[in-house]
């Protein structure tokens, strides 16, 4: 019978089998454990890596993503206005559109560059370079006109974008351009107040972020922060007075042929500058033309020079006021004291200095009125080097006035230890020293202000939209001479206008005082030129309580060149109109003086003849003629003059301009001019006679 086997092995067999499988199972368990540990380790590494990427280095990768997909664009703020002292706009900003491109968004760069070049009138190659320049942002054209922007927008080119920007404009064109200044294409101040106060005027720029996809295609843009408008600036300049000084400077330049010049008007009590005119001028709306460092660019840059602030000149006889101020203040002289002017010659440190006319005995008052060099040098010798230099510094020469005029010159002064033997004589009469017109008018302002020097100021206040104006910081006035000395000087300056070299500066209805100057320029050899001069006049009005101080400088006039002959006649044309505009009451006791163009007056106001003095030596101040008729000279006449417009002007004003132009006036009636026999602008040869009817 066959043996039947059980389906289940005996227990002994099972035990034996488990015993044999034990090592295998143990190995498997170990492998599972190691696998689990490896997976756990991998998970831990992955976890820590994710933590590193997502947490520890999150900022780094976000920044990297932003660099790849976000591109920031700085958006300029609207620049603050520049206003005159009565709130009239001298500089403002308007909103225009600028065009930029992301080259990665441009398809068919060559074709689009060709089309856009015709619209923008830009070289095709330049546009193609921008269209093919990679994924970065690039400007195509900035601050385009609205018409041009619409034409470009009508092209509907993908990849071209528009951004509004503020453009600086100057509504009055060239008016006060040297004071206001200008900006470049980035709206950064490049001159004048625009440069000096660039930071508050500019405000704070905004930031726009443009987001792109993986193919660098733009799909959104938003401001991170909006631009903050700049602060507006109110100047002390008055637009009406600025117009007057620019008009009269232009007339004087045309009449004298001077290539450069300036007129400055200030209020002596406050130091406020009411007007500054400079020639040559420029229009700040027009950019500088010409290639870099080219002659054309250099000419354009020269036009932007603020002559009153940046050009240092030898002042000539106008500087004698400082010598007189020191001598009177130190009680070394009295107005009525008589000085021997030695018939026009004096020896200083072994060198002979000649006067422009042979004066004998003159009072101190007459020395100033007739501008005697010898008499002035004697006062300078009484003062001595140290005291004269102290007064020069007290009157603020040798350092900038500190107004908002970038590039303002400090002038040229030197301490007494650097003076030559004859320097005490030269400096006393305005040689061997350099000043700016602003320094000169500030110093004379101290005399007008009874001895208190009020530092010049150009900015009245600043303000933000919706805020009250913040007054600009003011430097306090300081005393430089006593009130008594200042009063004496003002009376002596009045005599210089009534009887001396400043006769053509007399006003109608107002008292006036002043000082003329005719300084020789240094030529290419380093010597004083006999033909190249700077003619100047600085005047105050009214004398007892001056409301204005006016400085007039004409650089290198052609033909007649004395301060009394070419600069002084400009003073009444400026001062009379400014005083009336400011509401300064006229003196009813002053009647119009009928200035007749006789030979005596013309001889008194004639130009310096270098043959009369200083032959073979360093010359003293290129003189202006004194009132004493000691030397005859050619009359001050300009041939082929044009007839001025006399309408609305007083008798004295009409006669004085006619005299300067060599014309004769037949006056009928009193008051102001109503009719004239020859029309304004018509040619009139020297000696022509004009009938002018005056009425109330």
Image (cartoon, rainbow, N blue to C red):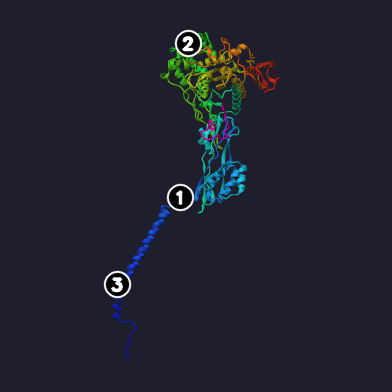
- Under circle 3, the secondary element is helix
Mark 3 = which residue?
23
The C terminus: image quadrant: top right
Q: Secondary structure at mark 1?
A: helix
Residue 691 lies left or right of residue 356; in this view the side is right
Q: Which one is closest to the eye, mark 3 or mark 2?
A: 2
Compared with 257, 166 (above or below) is below
**N-term mark: 1 or 2:** 1
Residue sitting nearer the eye, 95 or 182: 182
Query: Residue 180: horizontal and vertical position, in percent?
Result: 55, 31
Place of residue 46 in the rendered image (x, y in percent of width and height, measured from the top left): 39, 59
Q: Can you tell which quarter of the image residue 142 is in? A: top right
Using the rendered image of the protein, determine whether residue 569 is visible from the camera's viewpoint. yes
Q: Position of residue 473 (x, y in %)?
A: 50, 30
Q: CA distance from mark 3 to mark 2?
A: 133 Å
277 falls in the magenta region: yes
Structural distance between the alpha carbons of marks 1 and 2? 82 Å
**Residue 275 appears in the rendering:** no
Is 165 magenta? The answer is no
Q: Which portion, as a residue range, is magenta?
A: 276-298
In the image, 287 versus 670, the foreground residue is 287
Crowd around label 3: few <14 · some 14–19 · many ≥20 (10 Å): few
Quick one: SS at disc 2?
A: strand
Q: Are marks 1 and 2 in contact (CB under 8 Å)?
A: no
Quick check: 135 above or below 678?
A: below
Q: Residue pushed farthest bottom?
A: 1
Marks 1, 2: nearer the viewer: 2
Residue at screen point 39% across, 57% down: 48
Bin the neighbour count of mark 2 within 10 Å (Cα to Cα): few under 14, some 14-19, many 20 and up.
some
Judging by the rendered image, the residue that carries numbered circle 1 is 63
x then y, percent, for residue 441: 53, 22
Q: Which residue is mark 2?
A: 346
């Amino acid at each position: 019978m066959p043996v039947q086997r059980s389906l289940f092995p005996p227990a002994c067999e099972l035990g034996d089998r488990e015993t044999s499988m034990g090592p295998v199972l143990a190995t498997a368990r170990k492998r599972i454990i190691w696998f689990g540990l490896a997976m756990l380790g991998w998970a831990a590494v992955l976890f820590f890596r994710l933590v590193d990427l997502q947490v520890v280095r999150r900022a780094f990768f976000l920044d990297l993503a932003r660099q790849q997909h976000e591109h920031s664009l700085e958006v300029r703020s609207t620049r603050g206005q520049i206003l005159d002292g009565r709130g009239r706009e001298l500089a403002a900003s308007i909103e225009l559109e600028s065009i930029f491109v992301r080259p990665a968004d441009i398809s068919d760069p060559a074709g689009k560059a060709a089309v856009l070049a015709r619209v923008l009138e830009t070289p095709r190659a330049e546009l193609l370079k921008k269209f093919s320049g990679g994924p970065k942002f690039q400007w195509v054209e900035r601050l385009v006109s609205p018409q041009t922007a619409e034409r470009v927008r009508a092209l509907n080119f993908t990849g071209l974008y528009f951004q509004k920007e503020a453009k600086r404009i100057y509504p009055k064109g060239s008016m006060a351009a040297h004071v206001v200044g200008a900006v470049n294409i980035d709206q950064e101040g490049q001159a004048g107040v625009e440069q000096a106060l660039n930071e508050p005027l500019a405000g704070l720029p905004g930031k726009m972020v443009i987001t792109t996809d993986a193919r660098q295609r733009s799909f959104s843009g938003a401001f991170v922060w909006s631009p903050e408008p700049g602060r507006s600036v109110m100047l002390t300049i008055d637009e009406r007075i600025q117009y007057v000084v620019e008009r009269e400077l232009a007339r004087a330049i045309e009449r004298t042929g001077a290539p450069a010049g300036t007129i400055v008007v200030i209020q002596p009590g406050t130091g406020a500058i009411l007007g500054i005119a400079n020639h040559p001028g420029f229009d700040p709306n027009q950019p500088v033309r010409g290639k870099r460092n080219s002659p054309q660019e250099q000419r354009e840059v020269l036009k932007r020079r603020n002559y009153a602030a940046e050009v240092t000149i030898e002042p000539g006889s106008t500087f004698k006021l400082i010598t007189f101020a020191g001598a009177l203040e130190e009680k070394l002289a009295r107005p009525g004291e008589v000085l021997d002017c030695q018939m026009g010659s004096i020896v200083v440190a072994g060198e002979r200095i000649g006067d422009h006319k042979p004066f004998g005995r003159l009072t101190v008052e007459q020395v100033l009125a007739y501008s005697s060099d010898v008499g002035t040098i004697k006062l300078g010798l009484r003062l001595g080097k140290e005291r004269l230099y102290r007064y020069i510094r007290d009157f603020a020469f040798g350092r900038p006035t500190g107004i908002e005029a970038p590039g303002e010159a400090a002038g040229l002064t030197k301490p007494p230890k650097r003076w030559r033997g004859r320097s005490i004589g030269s400096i006393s009469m305005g040689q061997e020293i350099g000043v700016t017109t602003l320094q000169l008018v500030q110093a004379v302002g101290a005399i007008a202000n009874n001895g208190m020097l009020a530092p010049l100021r150009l900015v009245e206040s600043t303000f933000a939209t919706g805020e009250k104006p913040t007054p600009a910081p003011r430097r306090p006035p300081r005393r430089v001479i006593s009130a008594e000395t200042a009063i004496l000087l003002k009376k002596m300056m009045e005599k210089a206008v009534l009887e001396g070299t400043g006769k053509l500066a007399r006003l109608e209805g107002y008292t006036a005082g002043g000082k003329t100057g005719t300084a020789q320029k240094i030529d290419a050899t380093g010597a004083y030129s006999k033909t190249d001069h700077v003619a100047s006049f600085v005047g105050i009005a009214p004398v007892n309580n001056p409301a204005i101080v006016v400085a007039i400088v004409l650089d290198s006039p052609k033909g007649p060149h004395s301060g009394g002959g070419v600069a002084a006649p400009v003073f009444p044309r400026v001062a009379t109109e400014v005083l009336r505009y400011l509401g300064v009451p006229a003196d009813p006791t002053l009647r119009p003086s009928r200035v007749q163009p006789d030979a005596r007056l013309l001889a008194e106001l004639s130009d310096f003849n270098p043959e009369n003095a200083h032959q073979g030596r360093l010359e003293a101040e290129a003189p202006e003629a004194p009132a004493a008729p000691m030397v005859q000279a050619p009359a001050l006449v300009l041939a082929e003059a044009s007839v001025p417009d006399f309408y609305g002007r007083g008798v004295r004003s009409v006669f004085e301009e006619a005299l300067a132009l060599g014309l004769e006036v037949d006056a009928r009636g009193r008051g102001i001019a109503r009719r004239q026999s020859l029309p304004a602008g018509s040619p009139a040869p020297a000696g022509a006679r004009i009938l002018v009817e005056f009425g109330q």
